[in-house]
Image (tube, rainbow, N blue to C red):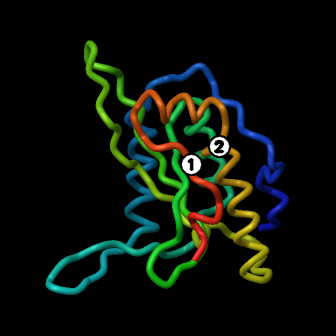
């Protein structure tokens, strides 16, 4: 897949007016989680998950559409373990219960290793991932959602590099 297939503009994505996630949407997100995050054994008997594989163009498009249409909050983070780069957490957007606003659960974490760039140099791919992810995470609509749900706003880029 050509990276030009992704919207790499450096401009914030525009969010829709919001609609609830359907059961089909939730099944899609659960399927992504099960397919692209594999269990692994860790120290001291703990278990965790690690990213594996690359999403198809249609999966990335559907995920991006769900984020925009359902006004799902996103946050940017660093890579993990020996996987340098960036990650983007996609959160649920639950309806408030009265005056109580609960911190939403993470539905999926998209790593730059999940993106099927054209396998150029690592630094070029990291830059493309940063631009794509921050189109969501740094958009005015998303910043409003982060504030509403009490999720921290993005830090400067150098805080995520290592």
Where is residue 10 shown, x and y percent of the image?
80, 49
Q: Residue at x 57, y 52 (%)?
A: 155
Q: Nearer the viewer, residue 159 or 28?
A: 159
Which residue is denoted by mark 1 in the rendering? 154
Q: Residue at x 58, y 35 (%)?
A: 142
As drawn, 116 above or below 31: below
Q: Residues within 10 Å of mark 1 (few under 14, many from 20)?
A: some
**Disc 2 and disc 1 in contact, CB within 8 angstroms:** yes
Label 2 CA crowd tier, 10 Å (few <14, some 14–19, many 20+): many
Mark 1 or mark 2, which is nearer the start of the sequence? 2
Q: Residue at x 55, y 66 (%)?
A: 111
Task: Give me the disc on residue 138.
Answer: 2
SS state under label 1: loop
Residue nearest the observer in this picture, 71 or 33 = 71
Residue at coordinates 75% horizontally, 67% vertically from top-left? 127
Quadrant position of residue 41: bottom left
Nearer to me, 59 or 85: 85
> Compared to 93, does 138 lie above or below?
below
């Amino acid at each position: 897949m050509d990276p030009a297939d992704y919207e790499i503009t450096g401009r914030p994505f525009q969010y829709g007016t919001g609609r609830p996630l359907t059961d089909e949407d939730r099944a899609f997100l659960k399927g992504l989680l099960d397919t692209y995050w594999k269990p692994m054994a860790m120290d001291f008997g703990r278990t965790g998950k690690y990213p594996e594989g690359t999403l198809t163009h249609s999966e990335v498009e559907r995920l991006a559409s769900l984020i925009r249409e359902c006004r799902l909050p996103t946050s940017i983070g660093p890579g993990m373990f020996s996987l340098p780069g960036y990650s983007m957490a996609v959160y649920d957007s639950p309806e408030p219960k009265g005056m109580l606003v609960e911190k939403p659960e993470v539905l999926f974490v998209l790593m730059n290793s999940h993106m099927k760039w054209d396998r150029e140099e690592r630094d070029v791919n990291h830059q493309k991932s940063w631009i794509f992810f921050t189109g969501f995470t740094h958009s005015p609509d998303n910043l409003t959602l982060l504030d509403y749900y009490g999720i921290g706003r993005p830090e400067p880029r150098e805080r995520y590099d290592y």
